[in-house]
Amino acid sequence: MTNQLPDFKPLGCNKCLEGGGLDFSFSMAFQPIVNVQEKQIFGYEALVRGINNEPAYTILDKLNDTNRYSFDQTIRVKAIQMAKQLDLQGMLSINFFPNAVYRPETCIRATLEAADVMDFPTKKLMFEVTEVEKVTDNNHLKNIFEEYKRHNFTTAIDDFGSGYAGLNLLADWQPDIIKLDMALIRGINTDKVRQAIVRSTIMTCQDLEIRVIAEGVETLEEFQYIRDQGVALFQGYYFAKPQFEALPEVDPALYV
């Protein structure tokens, strides 16, 4: 599957599909995001892997200022291509690098053409920016997300509560979704401090009409506590581990 890329040249990035500007290859694993209220899979996050399922860091450690743009463009197109091959029916979540996006209206063209050629609806695309990556220009990030919303993409902040921006980012711009960082989730059922932080974050998101995904959920007790706070969307080993070049199923019994 890794090398079965369709033969077309997206506008604005003629070599994205061939990994232009990159001296390494990579593939993807997919992890489900579940909606426990609707008792179904909401979508899948595409996670970078080596071509033999090596961990993400083996690829991300290769990034630098000269290849970050090419990687950011290529990973979007490859994720869409693989999702189409796997007949992914829900949302496809893709991580992106805001510091690699120079002009949003130009850098997005490869994504749009890939979705068009592969007949993958743009309304099923969700773009996550990790809060761990330090954004040098918050206005630039805001412009990126505004452009994404113009194209009906879903926008999300990943690892919320672990990085550089936190609530300051929400004050300037409101995404469709935030993903609570797994460090806040771990052991939350017995941790009064984490409970207070997560409850207040959920209330803030409810007031701002932002959906919450609890990621990194590993135990029944963690899941039950967060579910009881009104959260519907979950991701983590409790439901399913990422699967290399495949879409893992979720045991329906786990939704209860």
Image (cartoon, grey):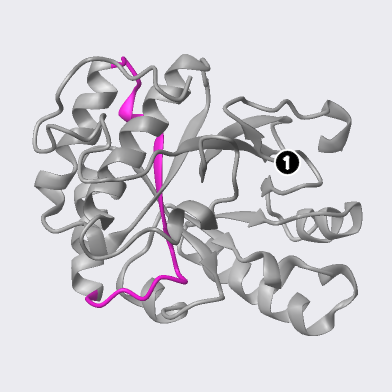
The correct choice, above or below, for 211 with respect to 164 in the image is: above
Q: Position of residue 11 (x, y in %)?
A: 9, 31
Tag 1: residue type? Lys
The one of 124 and 39 positioned closer to us in this rendering: 124
> Quadrant of the image for the C terminus?
top right
Spot occupied by residue 4 in the image (x, y as percentages of width and height) = 39, 17
Q: Of residues 230 and 191, which is closer to you in this image?
A: 191
Q: Is residue 161 above or below residue 84?
A: below
Q: Is residue 71 left or right of residue 4?
A: left
Residue 130 position, x and y percent, is 45, 63
What residue is at 48 percent from the left and 57 percent from the top? 210
Q: Residue at x 46, y 52 (%)?
A: 59
| 202 horizontally vs 121: left or right | right
Query: Residue at horizontal 73%, vertical 41%?
Result: 241
Q: Determine if residue 27 is in view.
A: yes
What range of the chain is rendered magenta?
118-137
Q: Is residue 124 visible?
A: no
SS at badge 1: loop
Q: Residue at x 29, y 15 (%)?
A: 6
Quarter where residue 112 is shown: top left
- State yes or no: residue 127 in magenta: yes
Residue neighbourhood size for the residue with mark 1, other residues' Cα within 10 Å, grouped as few (<14), some (14–19), many (≥20): some
Q: Nearer the viewer, residue 65 or 112?
A: 65
In which image quadrant can residue 36 be found?
A: top right
* Residue at the farthest bottom position: 193
The answer to which image quadrant residue 240 occupies is top right
Q: On the image, numbered disc 1 is attached to which residue?
A: 241
> Is residue 46 in the magenta section?
no
> Does residue 154 lie above or below 92 as drawn?
below
Is residue 174 rendered to the left or right of residue 106?
right
